Image (tube, grey):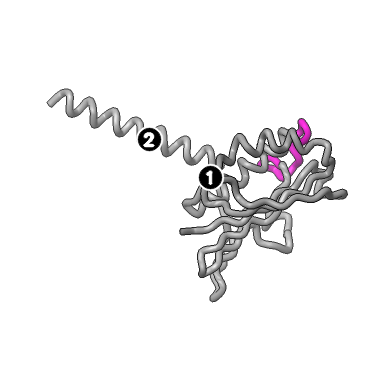
Amino acid sequence: MRLSAFILWGFVLCAAFLEAAAQESTGNLNMSQTDTAAGSFYSSELSLQQDFPFSDVVTTTGGLVFISGLVGTDETGELVPGGLRAETHAIFTQMQAYLAHLNLDLTDVVKCLVMIDDIDQWGDFNGVYTSYFKPPYPARSAMGADGLALRASLELECIAVNR
């Protein structure tokens, strides 16, 4: 009986730890949701406060998930210091939070568009990108871009599928 109680207690502690880790990884994301015949439109509290004229995430009735272009910002909406690598990690943190809000993850992403300010930093970007995405990789397009929001080094938008 004691062993069973000990094992049960271990499961309870493990579940509590995993729940706390999940909340931390998604940043307790608070999203406003508007449903239409076409799908659901989600905006973060920060986007609503800043009165952005777009939704952060749109899900269609057909299961497609569109994530608007992300730049590497912190929870206050400021560009993270440290350049392209730090910005890329911040983007993936945001992306994972949006996906987790919909009970999805990076394996559900099927297409990405990368806009990068300095194409000479492509290798640095790819190094971070491949630490998050594993084969088979999503389809991807890329372009050099000048004048990204907040003077960011890059912007990344993705499409996922809710299977």
Residue depicted at 58% across the width and 41% down the height: 133
Q: Residues within 10 Å of mark 1 (few under 14, many from 20)?
A: few
Q: Can I make out residue 88 in this image?
A: yes
Report the Cα–Cα distance between label 1 and label 2: 15 Å
Looking at the image, residue 22 sits to the left or right of residue 67; the answer is: left
Q: Residue furthest right?
A: 146
Residue 43 % position (x, y): 62, 58
> Which residue is the site of mark 1?
28
Residue depicted at 55% across the width and 63% down the height: 64
Is residue 87 shown above or below 36? above
- Of pointers 1 and 2, the one earlier in the residue sequence: 2
- The answer to if 79 sits in the magenta stretch is yes
- Tell me the element at label 2: helix
Closest to the observer, 75 or 111:
111
- Name the residue type under label 1: Asn
Toward which corner of the image does residue 131 lie, by quadrant? Answer: top right
**Residue range corresponding to the magenta coloring:** 73-84
User: What is the chief secondary structure element of the magenta stretch?
Assistant: loop
- Tell me the element at label 1: loop
Closest to the observer, 75 or 83:
83
Residue 16 disc label: 2
Residue 111 % position (x, y): 63, 54
Residue depicted at 42% across the width and 39% down the height: 19
Residue 84 % position (x, y): 76, 36
Toward which corner of the image does residue 58 lie, by quadrant? Answer: bottom right
Q: Residues within 10 Å of mark 2 (few under 14, many from 20)?
A: few
Where the N terminus falls, by quadrant? top left
Is residue 13 shown above or below 67? above
- Name the residue type under label 2: Ala
